[in-house]
Amino acid sequence: MSESAYRVETQSRLAQWKIESLSSCTYRKSDPFKIGNWNWHLSVEKNKVLYIKLFPVISNVTRDQPPIASFVIRVLCSHGSRHTLVHPGVTDKQIKNNDDFVWAIEAPLIGKFVIDVEFLDLKTANDGKPCSIWVEGLTQRRSSATALATLGRMLSESIHTDITIYASDGSIGAHRAILSSRSPVFRSMFSHNLKEKELSTINISDMSIEACHAFLNYVYGSIQHEEFLMHRLALLRAADKYDISDLKEACHESLLEDIDAKNVLERLQTAHLYQLPRLKGSCMRYLVKFGKIFDIRDDFNVFLQCADRDIIAEIFQEVLAVWKGF
């Protein structure tokens, strides 16, 4: 059989696989073809029924961002009088493997036929919300990126700032409308006759100017990853103080990722202070279930002298639970 028998021709969002003939009992899978961000396969299996499948090639891209596809698929038959079989259509179906889309055709197909797939849309789930990879989604993403860049410039270039934030070792200009839209605490400050509204100032004396810059960069959507990591604890404190839930959750997730012997006791105290149950549970498991409490015995003894009684009680309850398991 020639190599062309497995080749799928593509044009823009259209894919066509021409099949010269199939024996009475056979299976054939096409070569991979590229549509959107993914490589795809078509396959046909003929027994009593003809099964047509469409599925992405397994890869890191497919696993991390499986396609959510909308498409129309047809079979064009040339035997006798030309006729077309049309699938009812697929809308926003996530396809991860070769069992996610199967079309069973009971009508017999003899001679040459063409499988024609027209992709109407392909999406990925970004932050849980499906977003088109094509013009519609691209336009949206470009618009969002431009808006974020503009907000970042407003902050970094002090464009029409109308509020001054005083940190422990410096000050920075900001915009009360943006702060109010991101934090109900700031909105309350500027909605009532408080000194912040009257003086157009905010005093954040418990933050350094660097940490305050990082905080504002997050609020304005322009924070860099290294900056975020450097100031996580200060950002968590600010998120809790000013009721910015998404920042608090981002800090929580990040602090879960790199617990070690040097920071576990500080993280445990932080988890208790800011009510972060998953971080507290992870620190407890690290100390007790994995036995790291013995590796930091001296530091742990110091911790016991100044830690909150509730934390100490929880640690010993965890120890007792583990001992009962042996």
Image (cartoon, rainbow, N blue to C red):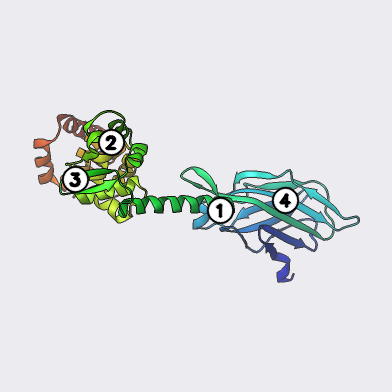
Q: Element under label 4?
A: strand
Query: Which numbered disc, 1 or 4, marks the residue closer to the eye?
Result: 1
Q: Element under label 1?
A: loop
Q: Between disc 4 and disc 2, whose residue precedes?
A: 4
Give the amino acid type for the residue marked by disc 1 in the picture. Ile
Query: Which numbered disc, 2 or 3, marks the residue closer to the eye?
Result: 3
Q: Element under label 2?
A: loop
- Can the viewer see residue 326 in this picture? no
The residue indicated by pointer 4 is: 73
Query: Which numbered disc, 4 or 2, marks the residue closer to the eye?
Result: 2
* Percent position of residue 183, x then y: 33, 36
Total residue callouts: 4
Q: Which mark, residue 167? A: 3
Quick one: quadrant of the N terminus? bottom right
Q: Residue drawn 64% across and 58% down? A: 41
Q: Is residue 248 left or right of residue 304?
A: right
Q: Residue drawn 10% across and 36% down? A: 306
Q: Element under label 3?
A: strand
Query: Which numbered disc, 1 or 2, marks the residue closer to the eye?
Result: 2
Which residue appears farthest toward the right when viewing the image? 80
Q: Is residue 10 left or right of residue 276?
A: right
Distance of label 2 from label 3 (alpha carbons): 15 Å
The residue indicated by pointer 2 is: 242
Q: Residues within 10 Å of mark 2 (few under 14, many from 20)?
A: some
Q: Between disc 2 and disc 3, whose residue precedes?
A: 3
